[in-house]
Amino acid sequence: MSHIEESIALDVPVTTAYNQWTQFEDFPHFMDGVERVDQVTDTSTHWVTKIAGVEREFDADITEQVPDERVAWTSRNGPKQAGVVTFHRLDDTHSKVMLQLEYAPEVFTEAVGDAMGIVRRKAKGDLERFKTFIESRGAETGAWRGQV
């Protein structure tokens, strides 16, 4: 398994950052290679990705969700991965988002890409696009404040 940790400071309050992150169906707006995310239930999502011309579908379960603090998940099938995004209040108008991801490359080309740091750069780019997305809007597109 490979481990990635990335973080980014945001010019929005922690609640705004958290609320936007709970809008899984908006992930294609800032996650490279994510074609679609369907929220099946409060704790289940279905993903369609297309990376380097390879399309995959898989399901993931939200294993923990605490408003303004964290969202954790694990894949149920397909690419083996698990992770957590934590949200940190810096002050009333600034926050920090930290991503921790564990994943297992499935094929040789994924292992090579991992060794070359491609997945780490992709995660960093996704966080930078999230920053641009939420800061340019100034407000979240929705919110789910439930706890898992």
Image (cartoon, rainbow, N blue to C red):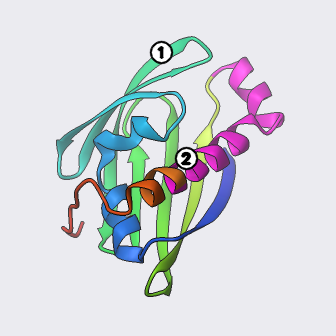
**Which element is circle 1 on?**
strand
Kindly report which numbered mark, 2 or 1, lies closer to the viewer in this rendering: 2
**Magenta span contains residue 115:** yes
Magenta segment, which residues? Answer: 107-131
Name the residue rendered at 48%, 69% in the picture. 86
Name the residue rendered at 64%, 31% in the picture. 105
Q: Which residue is mark 2?
A: 129
Q: Left of 4 or right of it: where is 98?
A: left
Q: Looking at this view, is 4 or 134 the one in front?
A: 134
The extreme top residue here reads: 53
Return the mark for residue 24. none
- Quarter of the image for the N terminus: give it: top right
The majority secondary structure of the magenta stretch comes to: helix
Q: Looking at this view, is 70 or 26 the one in front?
A: 26
Would you call the spot at circle 1 few (<14 residues within 10 Å), some (14-19), or many (20 or more)? few
User: Marks 1 and 2: in contact by CB < 8 Å?
Assistant: no
Residue 65, horizontal then vertical, whole percent: 31, 66
Would you call the spot at circle 2 few (<14 residues within 10 Å), some (14-19), or many (20 or more)? some
For marks 2 and 1 on the same chain, the one whose residue lies earlier in the sequence = 1
**Magenta span contains residue 119:** yes
- Determine whether 112 is above or below 129 in the image: above
Q: Which residue is mark 1?
A: 55
Q: Amino acid at mark 2?
A: Arg
